[in-house]
Image: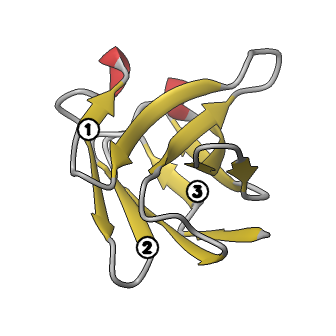
Amino acid sequence: QVQLAESGGGLVQAGGSLRLSCVASGSISSINVIGWYRQAPGYQRELVARITNYGSINYADFAKGRFTISRDIAKNIVHLQMNNLKPEDTGVYYCNLQQVALSSWGQGTQVTVSS
């Protein structure tokens, strides 16, 4: 069983910044991928960024140059620093931990960017 607890969402003006954090606990394999997805109303959930236990990182095109993902493996924490936020970044941001046979999701944190 894995638990993912997200924090850091909120309301920010366009051009502002937010830092999301996700703490993972429970049965966590040493081999995994942890990352952030988002879902806007009426849209499918999409990848924002993810990082492997080896440090390999993938960003969605919209996140490149504005968002930075990082992780503290020892503490099982992953952060998403989001800069220069835009109204289209509004949505619920979910933490995801992908292990060999299990994909776990957090409950999500709301990010709202006003114009």
State the SS at label 3. Answer: strand
Q: Which of the two labelled residues, at mark 3 and mark 2, occupies the earlier sequence position? A: 3
State the SS at label 2. Answer: strand
Q: Which residue in the structure is indicated by mark 1?
A: 57
Count of all numbered marks drawn on residues in the image: 3
Give the residue at x 23% y 27%: 64
Is residue 73 shown above or below 56? below
Q: How is the image coloured?
A: secondary structure
Tell me the quarter of the picture where residue 7 sits. Answer: bottom right
Horizontal side of residue 37 vs 69, given as left or right: right
Horizontal side of residue 63 vs 89, given as left or right: left
Give the residue at x 31% y 65%: 71
Q: Which of the two labelled residues, at mark 2 and mark 1, occupies the earlier sequence position? A: 1
**CA separation, marks 3 and 1?**
27 Å
Residue 28 picture location, percent across and down: 57, 69
**CA separation, marks 2 and 1?**
15 Å
Tell me the quarter of the picture where residue 73 sits. Answer: bottom left
Q: Which residue in the structure is indicated by mark 3?
A: 11
The residue lying toward the viewer, choosing from 69 and 16, is 69
Q: Amino acid at mark 3?
A: Leu
Task: Please identify the quadrant where the N terminus is shown.
Answer: bottom right
